[in-house]
Image (tube, rainbow, N blue to C red):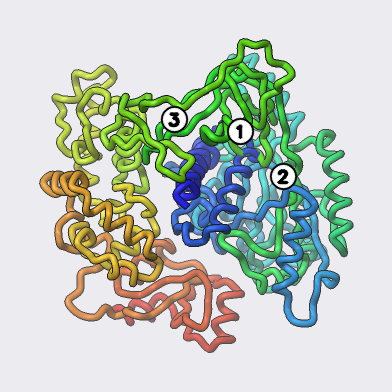
Amino acid sequence: MRDVESRIEVLRRQIRYHNHRYYVLDDPVISDAEYDVLMRELRELEEAHPKLVTPDSPTQRVGAEPLDEFQRVRHVRPMLSLQDAFDEEELRDWLIRTSKLLPQGMDAEDLEFVVEPKIDGLTVVLTYEDGRLVLGATRGNGVEGEDVTQNLRTIRSLPLRIPVSTNGPPPTRLVVRGEVYMPIGAFREFNRRQEELGEKTFANPRNVAAGSVRQLDPRITASRPLDLFTYAVVNVDGRTIRTQWEALEYLSGLGFPTNPGNRLLDDLNAVVEYYNEWVERREALDYEIDGVVVKINDLDLQKTLGSVGNAPRGAVAYKFPGREAVTKLLDIQVNVGRTGTITPYALLEPVKLSGATIRQATLHNEDYIRERDIRKGDTVLIRRAGEVIPQVIRPLVELRTGDERPWHMPEVCPSCGEPIIRPEGEVAYYCVNTACPAQLGRRIEHFASRGGMEIEGLGGRIAQRLVSEGLLRDVADIYYLREEDLLPLEGFADKKVGNLMEAIEASKKRPLSRLITALGIHYVGSVVARLLAERYRSLEALMEAPQEEMEAIEGIGPRIAKSIREWSNRPRNRKVVEKLRRAGVRSIAHRRMPEEVAETKGPQPLEGLTFVITGTLSIPRREMTALIEGHGGRVTGSVSSRTDYLLAGANPGDRKYTHAQELGKPIISEEELREMIG
């Protein structure tokens, strides 16, 4: 089991890294197909071992956090990720699984399917009020995105105002999803001009589209030839749309661009024929696609089927075959992970694959290398099956010259020189030296990250530099840095050092949940940390909590509780916590942080009540959520039998409002809520 846990941890780390490169930096180092391979392997391992699933796993969430430069926007409806099918058998397996959940009296033969080319671009959400575009947002983390309205206004195919059409007057409120892309011909011309000007060129159209939409200067966006296809109606006032095909026709009738390749088909055999047709057409298109999306046409049925994890059951992405290339394996090196895992990887002679230049590929572990007899100097086949991290599939033995050399795992850690071990029954090797510089640098980077203590200016390179200079031996040493320690270092000017010291001081006030996340306890991510922070008043209280008590918390199982207990019992960790306490980190001591829970001497006015929010409020949705939670209430995303109140602002969503009425749930205004709070 431990080898499975180790592999899951490696996959999660790689996926988080590539999520950041893709969604935040718009600078991916791998293709979508390679990313899908990683995610697919992680999903399969978690499905086979459900007890290893954690709330902070990449499979439990979508995407990544939006940039701070843009205003955050909360989506009307969370955006989920599609399941993947990589061949016809997997597509039919999806339908078999779905068919088992169909209402009584219905079977697969009764279903219709809408198939749409899967555009490789940037997903956006467009909001119209009285026919005018009022908001355009990126996907972000699926719950919140970035307000890029001014940039999207520059896309000529996007209607700024919906005219009166065959569908009648424009709706009072309309929310649409679409995909921004750059046509291939325009991309090539754009790159040619960039090269002439001596400016940066891009690997593929998707990178340009994403980077263009997220420019702080809309004039840059306007200078780039972007286009758009819309594909979904999220919300529309005054009209009920019952099928996906009706939604596409409605959008087209309003003047929105929809893909002319969309089709309504009546059985899965026709879907497979459509897919095969588009595999052939793919290279002739003027836009990038990486598969087709297959959706059950009946939207009510889609809703009834629900989702599994973060993937809707009523749709699937039928992906195109992975692409392969042949190149030279120059060397095999190892990477030391934050938890000490030693992972081999291949250094490759650079090769172009699916629009990206590949220089590295995964080799998984020593057993993988031995089983395939992969050697330094081999000519190897690499694959981007599913467009994730490239992997070395096999050596081309027939091309060997005799100069190739077998590889063996090093006996010592390349970072600290200490011996490495391979626990019995596991495939992974570990460096068990907790002071290992490679691990320490990553631990400090994690501690200072946005999801942790949010110390701006203490990124990966700076963390590693301070470790190598001997200034940081554990995360607590961050709070004992002095300006005179930093100023002599090259690149550390007065302003940079001053800003870093201010950020370190400000981080002492971070709430308990952020501190727990920052400490990097195995299996404890941001979601688990919040559950723990809601139960315990301080880190000290958590560290003294019995394992059985933690296990009783909803969402905290035996594995997580055991990991916390073991972490808390280690003398080195207790020493670090004591150093943090002496440094003035507020969440250590036995007191409740105001950022986490409002201080009260008696029952909270909203204690035990569950709210759902809909419509436009006088304050941002996240602030209203914090207000409710700060007075003991709970906010969920959808109306159910457990809902106590629906808080309705202006232009409330039809579905939530109607569902609340159907269930007889009280619908209240902001004023009524504030009266309840007192």
Amino acid beneath label 2: Ile
Q: Nearer the viewer, residue 277 or 346?
A: 346
- Tell which circle, 3 or 2, labels the residue nearer the N-terminal end: 2
Separation of marks 2 and 1 at Cα, in angstroms: 38 Å
Q: Describe residue 378's horizontal placement relative to residue 533 as left or right.
A: right
Residue plotted at (14% across, 48% down): 578
Viewer can see residue 202 = no
Q: Which numbered tag is attached to residue 371? A: 1
Amino acid beneath label 1: Glu
**Residue beneath label 3, please?**
335
Could you tell me residue 562's position as x and y percent?
A: 32, 59
Residue plotted at (36% across, 32% down): 420
Indicate which label's residue lies in the foreground, 1 or 3: 1
Residue plotted at (24% across, 66% down): 546
- Mark 1, other Cα within 10 Å: few <14 / some 14–19 / many ≥20: few
- Mark 2, other Cα within 10 Å: few <14 / some 14–19 / many ≥20: many
Q: Describe residue 496's horizontal placement relative to residue 554 as left or right.
A: left
Q: Quadrant of the C terminus?
A: bottom left
Separation of marks 1 and 3 at Cα, in angstroms: 20 Å
**Residue beneath label 2, please?**
119
